[in-house]
Amino acid sequence: GQQLNQSPQSMFIQEGEDVSMNCTSSSIFNTWLWYKQDPGEGPVLLIALYKAGELTSNGRLTAQFGITRKDSFLNISASIPSDVGIYFCAGPQPTLNSNSGYALNFGKGTSLLVTP
Amino acid sequence: DVKVTQSSRYLVKRTGEKVFLECVQDMDHENMFWYRQDPGLGLRLIYFSYDVKMKEKGDIPEGYSVSREKKERFSLILESASTNQTSMYLCASSTSGWNTEAFFGQGTRLTVV
């Protein structure tokens, strides 16, 4: 599938700090999704972006769909210990059957550790 | 809420065994997926199904097959398990169309010894 480059690979921060991570692609996407995976669990959708330039918030999380449609970022403000986990960006990759929709292509994730 | 349920959280199997991983979703979603997650490699798509009995290969289908006899159920089959298939397996589902929010199960951690 299309490669999504996610950075940084890992972050180790103190509680209360703000966090920023981003995702880039060589291809244009019409949707960007951000997921969080808690240790030992499946990923959970945090934010979905559908329009270039769109800025969307979900509590302390804010994500933006880049104007070029080739990038997106996720910010977390005032981090807390339960923010620990792996954050993935994802975008749709076309499947052979155009009527079936798309599978999601994922970045390799940003691992976030928060110390109290 | 969408619920995607995987039949096992943890499995230990022997090399050469045939292994079945089961996934059920309760939201009448057309699409179902199997991903594999390994450290440093993220989530990689194994197989995708867009309808009953319909399937497409993902990025890493070798050594796997799938079955979808009912809309709500999608099975991943390891025909002859090998140690390099030790991994976390994640099932997901979504509606059809370009709005592709996928909902994941809790994962199955498979160890092949």
Image: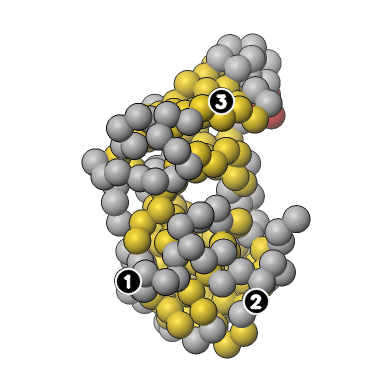
Can residue B50 be seen by looking at this rendering? yes
Gap in Å between the C-alphas at discs 2 and 1? 22 Å
Q: Is residue B85 toward the left or the right of residue B110 in the image? A: left
Q: Quick one: SS at disc 3?
A: strand
Q: Tell me the amino acid under the disc marked 1.
A: Leu
Crowding at mark 1 (Cα within 10 Å: few <14, some 14-19, many 20+): few
Q: Tell me the amino acid under the disc marked 2.
A: Glu
- Whether tag 3 and tag 1 are in contact, CB under 8 A, the answer is no
Q: Earlier in the sequence, mark 3 or mark 1?
A: 3
Crowding at mark 2 (Cα within 10 Å: few <14, some 14-19, many 20+): many
Vertical comparison of B107 with A76: above or below = below
Badge 2 is on which residue? B72
Front residue of this view, candidates A96 and B37: A96
Q: Quadrant of residue A9?
A: top left
Q: Which chain carries label 1?
A: A
- Image coords of residue B16 (percent x, y): 44, 81
Q: Which residue is at a point 62% across and 84% down the rendered structure image?
A: B70
Front residue of this view, candidates A30 and A114: A30
- Whether tag 2 and tag 1 are in contact, CB under 8 A, the answer is no
Badge 3 is on which residue? A62
| Residue at far left of view | A26
Q: Which residue is at a point 71% across and 59% down the rendered structure image?
A: B2
Vertical comparison of B58 with A61: above or below = below
Gap in Å between the C-alphas at discs 3 and 2? 33 Å
Q: Which chain carries label 3?
A: A
Say which quadrant the N terminus of chain A sits in. bottom left
Can residue A24 be seen by looking at this rendering? no
Q: Mark 2 lies on which chain?
A: B
- Image coords of residue B88 (percent x, y): 52, 58
Q: In which quarter of the image is residue B27?
A: bottom right
Q: Residue A96 carries which label?
A: 1
Vertical comparison of A56 with B31: above or below = above
